[in-house]
């Protein structure tokens, strides 16, 4: 029974501790992020840290110097008073009896004992005498009744370590009347709170010991007040320096922040963004340089847009204008091609070559026209709910003849259930044909795997070849217009170099992705991902961009790293 109750309790404690750790890490992450992003916070914090360090060092130095000066001055004065008192006490102890009688006859003091008279002369009598700035103890342990004390001092109040010092010095043959001193907090036997006291002691003749008790309460209170004043002044100075640093930093950071915001707006396409120029300082020159840069950038972009527009218009016009003479030439070429059997071998071969090149020319014109439609924003979709498997089968059927000529075969991995999606079948079929032709071109006669996958939101088709593969960085360049991975490699199919560029435009027109993965020596894989519902936003793909066998092999070796694909917005695995 008890274990069953303790386990949930332990789990609850673990959950609480885990939540606390997560919140702590989140808070630390937020602080770290704020620190990295705020220049003003960094400057203010650095200023405060340096100021606190400097003020602390100076404060400790000043307190030490003041403490040393006050204590040393008080000690020197105490030693001087103690020396003078010991001289008077020694003189009283050295008087002969006859001298004592004469001194008593000529004195107005009611005290007859010369030692008492000496103490009377040093300290005074009455309440005011016992309240003097220090107290005195004359101790003679060998003579009963020979001890004298002023105020509330008793023999037991003498610090043991001071008496030990005096005894050690006496045992070693030290000079009499040479004082020793200690400074400690003493709780007097007469009562009261412990007080910081300077005790000065010395052996004098006839076995007497003289101890002076100098209270350091006033000096201690003064030093405490000085320390408090220095702390308050130091805190005020640090806060003042922080405020000054904040003000100065704001004057510098605010223009920089405005420049950063203007640069972000300029990068977002607002080419008319400019900074206000105030004054002639470095920040003003920075704003002027930024405005000049923005103006030159806007001019260059405008010129490039005009040039691009002229190029697109030229391509569109030439493509349309070439169709009419091409149609006429094609009609004549068809007549010659149909009658080639009646020609001489050389003429027949020429008719066949002309027919093949005209077909290639027509394909190039069709691609150029399609690109011009995308550039003009005139491309549209003819959507229909279609089984993606049927589109894949048609594309594979159109590519089988070419695959046979290259000694390549297809392996289809299709789901058993229909994979319906709202797509433009003609465009998707064209995408797949381009991917299959590309795989045949670069697959080096090895098997090509075509995989279809689907989930609730998306349908995907992956075309995998085992040819030369792609070098690092070529997975994005492969979709550029007229780009070739190896310019020295001769084309065996005779494409225009626009197929993959048009395919990506078709995929983006559907709201989908067309992505590539490749590694030299391991081949490449192209993945087409389309939303099953027109207009839906893709959040992921049912197929991995990296082939499963490569992913598994590299996972075993520990050489694969999860990377967030910026184009797909999902977690994919990029090979190192």
Image: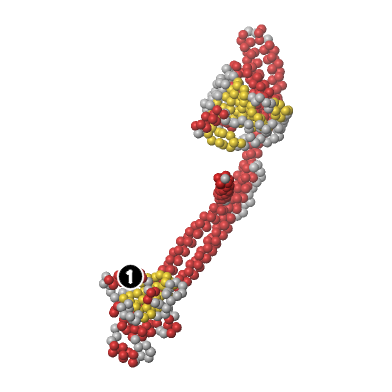
Asked whether residue 331 appears in the rendered view, the answer is yes
Residue that protrudes farthest toward the front in the picture: 1
Location of residue 494 (image quadrant):
top right
User: On the picture, is 129 further left or further right than 25?
Assistant: left
Q: Secondary structure at mark 1?
A: helix
Residue 365 is situated, as x and y percent measured from the top left of the image, at 67, 24
Residue at the (57%, 30%) spot, across then down: 546
Residue 237 against residue 420 in the figure, above or below: below
Residue that protrudes farthest toward the bottom in the picture: 105
| In-front residue for pair 448/299 | 448
Location of residue 461 (image quadrant):
top right
Residue at the (33%, 70%) spot, across then down: 164
Residue 36 is situated, as x and y percent measured from the top left of the image, at 55, 49
User: On the picture, is 536 further left or further right than 139?
Assistant: right
**Residue that mark 1 sits on:** 164
Residue 472 is situated, as x and y percent measured from the top left of the image, at 54, 32
Asked whether residue 77 appears in the rendered view, the answer is no
């Amino acid at each position: 029974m008890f274990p069953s109750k303790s386990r949930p309790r332990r789990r609850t404690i673990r959950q609480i501790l885990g939540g606390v750790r997560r919140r702590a890490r989140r808070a630390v992450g937020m602080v770290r992020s704020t620190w990295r992003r705020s220049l003003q916070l960094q400057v203010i914090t650095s200023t405060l840290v340096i100021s606190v360090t400097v003020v602390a060092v100076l404060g400790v130095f000043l307190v030490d110097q003041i403490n040393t000066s006050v204590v040393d001055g008080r000690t020197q004065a105490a030693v001087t008073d103690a020396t003078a008192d010991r001289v008077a006490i020694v003189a009283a102890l050295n008087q002969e009896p006859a001298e004592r009688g004469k001194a008593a006859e000529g004195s107005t003091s009611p005290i007859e004992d010369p030692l008492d008279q000496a103490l009377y002369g040093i300290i005074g009598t009455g309440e005011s005498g016992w309240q003097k700035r220090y107290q005195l103890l004359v101790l003679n342990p060998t003579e009963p009744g020979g001890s004298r004390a002023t105020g509330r001092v008793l023999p037991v109040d003498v610090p043991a370590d001071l008496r030990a010092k005096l005894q050690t010095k006496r045992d070693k043959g030290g000079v009499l009347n040479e004082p020793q001193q200690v400074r400690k907090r003493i709780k007097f036997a007469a009562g009261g709170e412990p007080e910081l006291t300077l005790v000065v002691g010395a052996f004098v003749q006839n076995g007497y010991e003289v101890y002076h008790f100098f209270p350091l309460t006033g000096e201690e209170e003064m030093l405490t007040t000085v320390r408090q004043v220095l702390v308050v002044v130091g805190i005020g100075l640090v806060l003042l320096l922080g405020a000054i640093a904040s003000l100065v930093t704001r004057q510098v950071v605010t223009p920089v922040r405005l420049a950063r915001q203007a640069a972000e707006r300029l990068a977002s396409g607002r080419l008319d963004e400019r900074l206000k120029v105030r004054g002639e300082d470095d920040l003003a020159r920075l704003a002027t340089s930024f405005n000049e840069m923005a103006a030159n950038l806007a001019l260059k972009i405008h010129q490039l847009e005009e040039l691009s527009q002229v190029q697109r218009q030229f391509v569109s016009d030439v493509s349309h204008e070439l169709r009419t003479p091409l149609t006429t030439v094609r009609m004549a070429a068809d007549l010659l091609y149909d009658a080639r059997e009646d020609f001489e071998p050389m003429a027949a071969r020429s008719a066949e070559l002309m027919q093949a090149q005209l077909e290639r020319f027509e394909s190039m014109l069709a691609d150029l026209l399609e690109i011009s439609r995308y550039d003009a924003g005139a491309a549209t979709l003819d959507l229909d709910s279609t089984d993606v498997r049927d589109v894949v089968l048609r594309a594979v059927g159109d590519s089988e003849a070419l695959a046979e000529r290259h000694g390549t075969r297809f392996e289809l991995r299709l789901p058993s259930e229909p994979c319906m999606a709202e797509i433009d079948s003609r465009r998707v079929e064209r995408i797949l044909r381009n991917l299959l032709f590309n795989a045949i071109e670069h697959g080096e006669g090895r098997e090509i795997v075509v995989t279809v996958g689907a989930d609730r939101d998306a349908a995907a088709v992956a075309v995998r070849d085992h040819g030369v593969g792609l070098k690092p960085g070529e997975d994005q360049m492969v979709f550029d217009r007229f780009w070739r991975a190896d310019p020295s490699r001769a084309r065996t199919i005779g494409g225009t170099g626009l197929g993959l560029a048009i395919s990506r435009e078709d995929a983006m027109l559907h709201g989908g992705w067309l992505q590539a993965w490749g590694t030299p020596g391991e081949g490449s894989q192209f993945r087409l991902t389309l939303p099953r519902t027109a207009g839906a936003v893709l959040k992921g793909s049912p197929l991995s961009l990296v082939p499963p066998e490569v992913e598994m092999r590299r996972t075993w070796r520990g050489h694969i790293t999860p990377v967030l694909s910026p184009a797909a917005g999902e977690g994919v695995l990029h090979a190192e």
